[in-house]
Amino acid sequence: MKTSPAISPSTEEGRITHTWQSIVICALLLFVGINLRSVILAVPPVLPLIKQDLNLSYTAVGLLTALPILMTGITAWYSGLLIERIGGRTAIIWGLILLALGTLLRAWISVFALFFFTVVLSIGIALSQTTAPVLVRRWFPNHIGLVTALFTDGLIIGETIGAGGTVPLMLLFLGKNNWVATFIFWGIPVVICLVLWLWLAPPVPSMRRPTPVASEEHLTSIDVPIAPEKKVSVLQLGLILGSGSLIYFGMNSWIASYNQAIHATNLTPLALTILNAAQLPSSFGVTFFAQRIVGRRWPFIAAGVVATLNIVAWVFAPPFLEYVWAALLGASSALVFTLGLALPPLLASPQKVARVTGATLSLSYSIAFIGPFIGGSLWDIFGLPAMAFVPVAAASFLLIVLGLFLPLRSMGHKH
């Protein structure tokens, strides 16, 4: 049987060398990224409706929005180990299957179904997101920063359309207050993505076999002047990524409920859209400069300073200015995420990329989990809407401190 060239790697090591094939694979990774975020960020805009219909407390609402983060934190490390056994292509397949099932089946109107299938889809997200940098390292060893940034762009596009498009879509086509139908709607592209992946994604050679010496040396010849693997620890990278993720997910979790509490619900759709859309210019900009600025201190320090100032302004400045703060917070979080996600495939040897990525994401999302959950608990305890943003403010300041103590990058050898 004749096979499509799109499913055959160009080299024994799995590198993609043909231009048209590279475009197809990059588009696939972009589409995967979109689906990994659209199903999550479609929830915050309709949280007030879910809370009302299912009679949830603010603590339960915080737990619901934090579940994908928690499950990623718990399972990303194990996902890295699983990837080494079943391969990256197969790992994405299983990740998308879990994502599709969880997204569609949580449409059952019950508290149990909502939380249980959110756990299912979250495991799929963790597996797929951990796998993507591994495949980037295999398929595009000379363009790790660029292709990782493209995958990150997909995540951000998914966040933007999920957060900004869900309510207008519901009101125009699915029925007023029909939040259940939005779950089904966002599950359909996941199924399409799975079909395309099965059809077009090339196989990946085993990651358990010894890598030739030339391949190991090739890692140091990538056009990224960066220090050896041991220069940046998984702990430090996980803390930085966790702080940036907590800022982002914390804001997405509580903008709608906070604006409802201060009687400014009319600001919510555009504020969420801007928060997520503002990530795109930041991510696109980093896409072209990632090779030069990755590993430096100043991007993380700058992101922390901007986030700290803007979360304070969100609470104390007039509400109509929150569009400005949303834009700056979104851009800051995207900067941290894009630079941080590229580090494991850049720094680790081919055999260690899966484990390093898994460990980094586990720590990162474990930290990010505490934001929405603690924020909701503080709101319940003190009865003050602004308390939901306290973890966001703490993470912003921590990002400054972590950036200051990030080891200076060795300029190394550039080719």
Image (tube, rainbow, N blue to C red):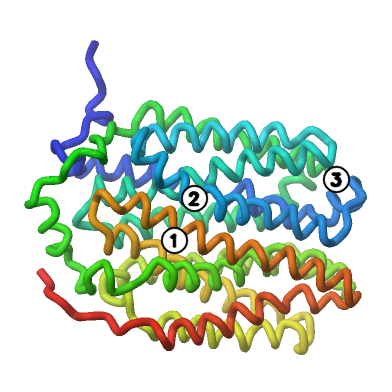
For mark 2, does the 10 Å Cα neighbourhood hold few (<14), some (14 to 19), or many (20 or more) residues?
Answer: many
Marks 2 and 3: which is nearer the front? 2
Q: Could you say which quadrant of the image residue 342 lies in?
A: bottom left
> Camera-side residue: 220 or 35?
220
Amino acid type of disc 1?
Thr
Amino acid type of disc 2?
Ala
| Quarter of the image where the N terminus is located | top left
Q: Which mark is residue 176?
A: 3
Q: CA distance from mark 1 to mark 3?
A: 41 Å
Q: Residue at x 69, y 69 (%)?
A: 271
Q: Which mark is residue 239?
A: none
Above or below: residue 22 compared with residue 411 = above
| Quarter of the image where the C terminus is located | bottom left
Q: Could you say which quadrant of the image residue 122 lies in?
A: top right
Q: Position of residue 37 (x, y in %)?
A: 57, 51
Marks 1 and 3: which is nearer the front? 1
Circle 1: element type: helix
Circle 3: element type: loop
Side of 94 where 231 appears, left or right:
left
* Marks 1,2: beta carbons within 8 A: yes
For label 2, the residue is 76
Q: Is residue 162 visible?
A: no
